[in-house]
Amino acid sequence: MIASPYPARIPEKISGKKIPSVLIHEIIDGKPYYLKGYRDVLAKTKKIEDIMGSSSLQAFLITYLTIWIGKQLDEDKYFILTNEAGLHLDKGNNLAGDLLIFDNKKLTIDKIDRNYANVPPKIAVEIDINVALEGYEEHSYMVLKIKKLLDFGVEKVIWFSTASKKVMIATADEEWQTQNWDKDVEILDGIVCNVGTYLKEKGSEFA
């Protein structure tokens, strides 16, 4: 997670305790969504750095996708941003992305700076969910975030779930699809990945 340079909703309080802004992972419609495990930090059973990172499985898959796509992507046309790259959609909407692919005619090199990107990526790829889902079903949060991304101008959102071994593929003009992650998924321009097959080839129990 990176700190947003844009104004955010004032952090809320729980039992009289102000929640530090560093624990906010995303803001959607002015509502802060906190990092999974943030209550443990408030209870002082964990430190902030204990909940900041991804699981090794998440990191493994993000690395695979970044390298696999990067090897085939036309560098004259696209940029890849990873590491919970920040997106500033508008006032009250700051999102984070695991892997974002930008058309470099939209995200020009002069726009790559210390702020969140404020133009839509062409493709957004997510692995699991890193926010505390208090009062939300996992699917409801995913639908909310996907709709925000598509309304912002993202052409395709691809969301992998390590728990269900499924992948959701969403676009603005087609019916959303959910399939097993051992089936091919086209990222863009004919670049295809297969997370399930990759894990199986590596001998992972999560294939």
Image (cartoon, rainbow, N blue to C red):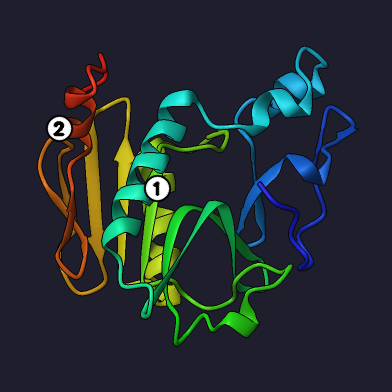
Query: Where is 168 relative to 5, above or below?
Result: above
Q: Earlier in the sequence, mark 1 or mark 2?
A: 1
Query: Where is 171 relative to 63, above or below?
Result: below
Q: Residue 197's mark?
A: 2
Direction left: furthest residue? 183
Which percent across, then down, holds residue 184? 11, 47
Q: Tell me the kind of residue under disc 2.
A: Thr
The answer to whether the residue labelled 1 contacts the one labelled 2, judged by CB atoms less than 8 Å apart, is no
The mark tally for this picture is 2
User: What separation in Å lies between label 1 and label 2 (alpha carbons)?
Assistant: 18 Å
Which percent across, then down, holds residue 18? 88, 37
Reading the image, the residue beneath label 1 is: 126
Which percent across, then down, holds residue 81? 50, 60
* Label 1: element kind: strand
Is residue 113 shown left or right of residue 79?
right
Which residue is painted at 74% across and 60% down in the image?
A: 4
Which percent across, then down, holds residue 160? 31, 41
Is residue 45 shown left or right of residue 88?
right
Which residue is painted at 57% across and 33% down in the image?
A: 132
Query: Where is 51 relative to 181, above or below?
Result: above
| Crowd tier of the residue under label 1, counting other residues whose Cα lies within 10 Å: few below 14, some 14–19, many 20 or above | many
Is residue 130 shown left or right of residue 156?
right
Q: Quadrant of the C terminus?
A: top left
Quadrant of the rendered image containing residue 71: bottom left
Direction bottom: furthest residue? 105
Quadrant of the rendered image containing residue 60: top left
* Label 2: element kind: helix
Query: Where is 16 relative to 82, above or below?
Result: above
Q: Tell me the kind of residue under disc 1.
A: Glu
